[in-house]
Image (cartoon, rainbow, N blue to C red):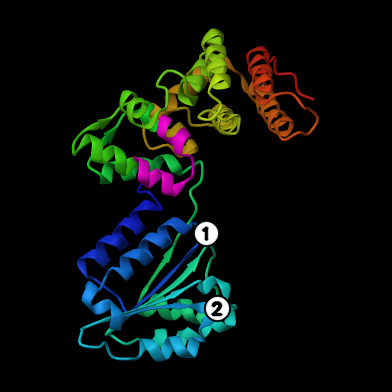
Amino acid sequence: MASPIADPFASLRRDIAAGNLRPVYLLHGEEGYYIDRLVEDFENLLPEADRAFNLYQLYAPETSMDTVMEVARRYPMMADRQVVIVKEAHAIRADQLNKLHSYAERPSESTVLVIACRGAVAKGKELIDAVKKNGVIFESKRLTDRNVGPVISELIKAHNLTVDPKALAMLRDYIGCDVAKLYNEITKLATILGKGAQVTPEVVERNIGISKDYNNFELTDAIAARDVAKAFRIAEYFRANPKNNPTVVTVVTLFNLFSNLLIYHYTRDKSPSGYMDALGFRNQWQLRPYETAARSYNVRQTIEIISALRDFDRKTKGVGSRMNEYDLFRDLLFHIFTARGILD
């Protein structure tokens, strides 16, 4: 299954770079990074000598849509094409933005009109329908904990690199859903390693600064296997290095472990493919922690631990406790390892 986010973005950038252009583009959505990069690509579409007369950057809150359409219908000056970019289009009313539908229905072939709604989904059905017919709509969706791993994997592949499963988990925990950091770190690794190299835990530790022995990947492995000593060693390392190991990231990782384990327990089809379908996994190696954890924690224990994780999250936010978050985390680990499956 291809990445739902990285592929349309990469494909659109390739089209822009190759000059495979449509007359109208609507860029919208909550994730600003993709829209910013695409706007930069459109800004650089013209040779530098042509930009003074044929690149228009208009700000929607300060410009009427009638003016936008007038500019878009002009002929380029001593060039084959002009580029008109409407920025901050999310900041005007939907009925105002929708006025552009009359232009989008009959766009000028010598103009590339880019409408950028950064941080919001565009409204205006007539405009959307017209752009669908004559142009391109790109929705920039936020990454989620569930799809960030596949996006990282696809981006590494796009840089002609391969990645070790543990290294992928380390990157996922470190980067989280920060798209700008994702692209910066993967690009850095690609520059350092070169084509055909593998991203290993040692590479991540050396170039990004995440310990290959003390991280959330190792912690979840230790908890899944009931390796108490290792889990508490990692917890002490986290306490000593809080900047790179915030408990808010760790608790999300553990919540994913046990919530997926609950799905694993209740999956009727006990074959590897059945588990992969239920959990939305693409590779069988992703099942290994759950195969181990299922032998360590039954259904009732898993439910109790999920409740403990939610209680930990509340307490770290100051609800019902003023303890240090790493002290609370030690208590959480103790609760996990001693869970008896007693439910309220």
Residue 140 lies, with reference to residue 103, above or below; the image says: above
Quadrant for residue 226, please give it.
top right
Check residue 130 for magenta coloring: no
Q: Which mark is residue 153?
A: none
Task: Name the residue carrying label 1.
Answer: 30
On screen, residue 185 versus residue 159, left or right, reads right
Q: Nearer the viewer, residue 143 or 32?
A: 32
Q: Residue at point 28% right, 77% down?
A: 51
Q: Which residues are magenta?
A: 170-185
Quadrant for residue 107, please give it.
bottom left
Could you tell me the amino acid type at mark 1? Glu
Which quadrant of the figure contains the C terminus?
top right
Q: Residue at point 23% right, 34% down?
A: 193
Residue 187 lies, with reference to residue 123, above or below; the image says: above
Q: Residue at point 48% right, 31% down?
A: 269
Residue 96 lies, with reference to residue 2, above or below; the image says: below
Task: Name the residue carrying label 2.
Answer: 61
Q: In this view, which residue lies farthest toward the top?
A: 229
Residue 163 lies, with reference to residue 134, above or below; the image says: above
Quadrant for residue 202, please give it.
top left
Q: Position of residue 308 (x, y in %)?
A: 70, 25
